[in-house]
Image: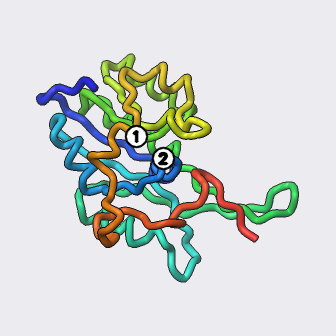
Amino acid sequence: MTFYPQERIALFIDGSNLYAAARALGFDIDYKRLLEVFAEKGHLVRAFYYTALIEDQEYSPIRPLVDWLDYNGYTMVTKPTKEFTDAAGRRKIKGNMDIELAIDVMEMAEHLDHAIVFSGDGDFRRLVDAVQRRGLRVTVVSTVRSQPPMVADELRRQADNFIELDDLRAQIARDPNTRHDHGSPGDDEYGDADEVETA
């Protein structure tokens, strides 16, 4: 990992993608510790967290996490999920945050030296290429140790650095013996990364 103390850095966290990667590796993330780890690596300008919210639910299990992050140093970017019926007649919920994340990286590029993208989504390869040509260094955080790997090969190749999420486990994993008071989602607080199938 190459970080320089004087560089301006920002985190761009694809919430459902990071959650799925950590879950595939068998641990929960302590978001307070995650922020501390990266704040020590340079001048942390902003930490964005992207997630879609199911609006019409009486209680959204991710709401406590969203509120906690909002009060504890993260810039929350949320939007309501969209419900649709697929060709087989199944109700599905879609909540993809790729465009929001991409726009923020592009808009922040001139104010940063280094962007850290927490996602393995291959769709971000083109974004990484675009901001690199504007002088930004990009680190991707995801995992190749899950089955199947959670990071797209083309994204990993495009990035300046790749951080294996499993290598951060000792620094950012939530202690399973503690309460959920550090903004770490409990089990089943997310569905699939972008789509959730409903009955």
Q: Compared with residue 124, is residue 160 higher up or lower down, i.e. above or below? A: above
**Color style of the picture:** rainbow
Q: As drawn, is 98 to the left or to the right of 93?
A: left
Q: Position of residue 43 (x, y in %)?
A: 15, 37
Q: Residues within 10 Å of mark 2 (few under 14, many from 20)?
A: some
Report the Cα–Cα distance between label 1 and label 2. Answer: 7 Å
Q: Position of residue 191 (x, y in %)?
A: 59, 60
Closest to the observer, 64 or 75: 64
- State which quarter of the image contains the N terminus: top left
- Residue 2 placement: quadrant: top left
Location of mark 2 (residue): 25
Secondary element at tag 1: helix
Q: Position of residue 74 (x, y in %)?
A: 29, 55
The amino acid type, in three-letter code, at marker 1 is Asp
Q: Residue at x 17, y 29 (%)?
A: 7
The amino acid type, in three-letter code, at marker 2 is Leu
* Sequence-first disc among 1 and 2: 2
For residue 52, the mark is: none
Q: Position of residue 6 (x, y in %)?
A: 12, 28
- Residue 122 placement: quadrant: top right
Closest to the observer, 41 or 98: 41
Q: Compared with residue 91, is residue 104 higher up or lower down, i.e. above or below? A: above
Q: Compared with residue 22, is residue 125 higher up or lower down, i.e. above or below? A: above
Q: Residue at x 47, y 52 (%)?
A: 26
Location of mark 1 (residue): 166
Q: Residue furthest right?
A: 88
Q: Residues within 10 Å of mark 1 (few under 14, many from 20)?
A: many
- Residue 149 placement: quadrant: top right
